Amino acid sequence: GSILYKLFLVDYYKTVGNTVKADEWKNKSLTCREPEAFFEYAQSLELKGDSKAAFSAFDNYKRAAKMGHLDAQRMVAECSQTGYGTHVNKDKAEEWYLTAARKGDKKASSLLSKLQNSRVASYLDMSESLSDSHEILALKLVKAASKGDVQAMYEVGLLLGEDDEGAKFLKKAADRNHVQALCVLGNIAEKNGDYKLASEYFSKAFYFGKDATAAFNLGILYDNGLGVDCDPKRAEFYYLKAAKAGDSDAAYNYACTLHSKTRKTSSCPSHLSTLSSELCTTASSSQERKTLILEAIKWLDILSTF
């Protein structure tokens, strides 16, 4: 009565050459709704070698996969990648490879990596016959970020904006002491009213880069006691540092501290390097640029590794 016994009988009758009995017990095993039965049946169908059997094999692999059968999940991915018993769907192949890989299937993990690399290589090969269109620029930028290019992480974060996706890239760059990323995150924290966090970001930016924007904003925080103790002397120190670095607003505020006048209250960095500048030129709107970057991320599937 058990599924294992029924599958044993299937194997036995296949061994002795009684395909009728083997199919009979295979059908009986399928009524048990056991994923192993669907998987075994799919494998036996593959041996028939015709297109009708291939479609049936894929269907049974998929049934087993949806019931959590690890080998079946990898097989559904392979079928989707190659078009065996179904149409080629590499997006679905990646999904099933990832599902199996997350459960510890090393073969699925390896096949997933190979598929993603081949898709990226294929996509990038298109650039040989194209000028650097905005799609290619976006992909190159995201690929650079995925390979650990800190400047690229920063630029992707800027292009995505202040939402979760953008902040994720900016924080990765900031963790590597990227000064402009630290300043942008400081401005975001300041905008959200988290002045303590803003002071931490600006302090790191000033420490690692003697950045004028960071110094100016630290001056504001110490001048007004926002997130830090009010300290006019430290405010003057930071205003002067920023002024000497060429920040005109800081120079104005430094002068104001000497005469108790109203200060200017914000300074935002805006740095873009070559790739993202080109992307800004070729893609007309910020929403279009964001869409392009998100599409590139989808191609490279890197958020899950961050």
Image (cartoon, rainbow, N blue to C red):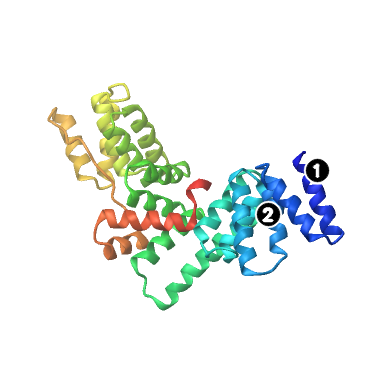
Assign a secondary structure to mark 1. helix
- How far, Cα to Cα, is label 1 from label 2? 29 Å
Residue 203 visible: yes
Q: 306 left or right of 283? A: right
Classify 266 as above or below 289: above
In this image, 50 relative to 173: left or right?
right
At label 2, the amino acid type is Lys
Considering only vertical position in the picture, is 202 above or below 224?
below
Query: What residue sits 42% from the left and 46% below the top?
Result: 169
Identify the mark at residue 274; answer none if there is no mark.
none
Q: Nearer the viewer, residue 10 or 230?
A: 10
- In percent of width and height, residue 273 lies at 35, 59
Residue 249 percent across, percent down from the top left: 19, 42
The residue at the far right in this view is 16
Mark 1: amino acid: Tyr
Q: Dot 2 surroundings within 10 Å: few (below 14), some, or many (20 or more)? A: some
Image location (x, y in percent) of residue 44? 72, 59
Quadrant hosting residue 279: bottom left
Tell me where residue 260 sits by quadrant: top left
Q: Nearer the viewer, residue 284 or 21?
A: 21
Judge left or right: residue 225 versus residue 25: left
Q: Earlier in the sequence, mark 1 or mark 2?
A: 1
Identify which residue is drawn at 24% across, 45% down. 247
- Residue that label 2 marks: 107
Q: Residue at x 61, y 66 (%)?
A: 52
Mark 1 or 2: the one toward you: 1
Which image quarter holds the N terminus?
top right
Label 1 crowding class (10 Å Cα cut-off): few <14, some 14-19, many 20+? Answer: few
Q: Who is closer to the viewer here, 100 or 29? A: 29
Q: Which residue is mark 1?
A: 5
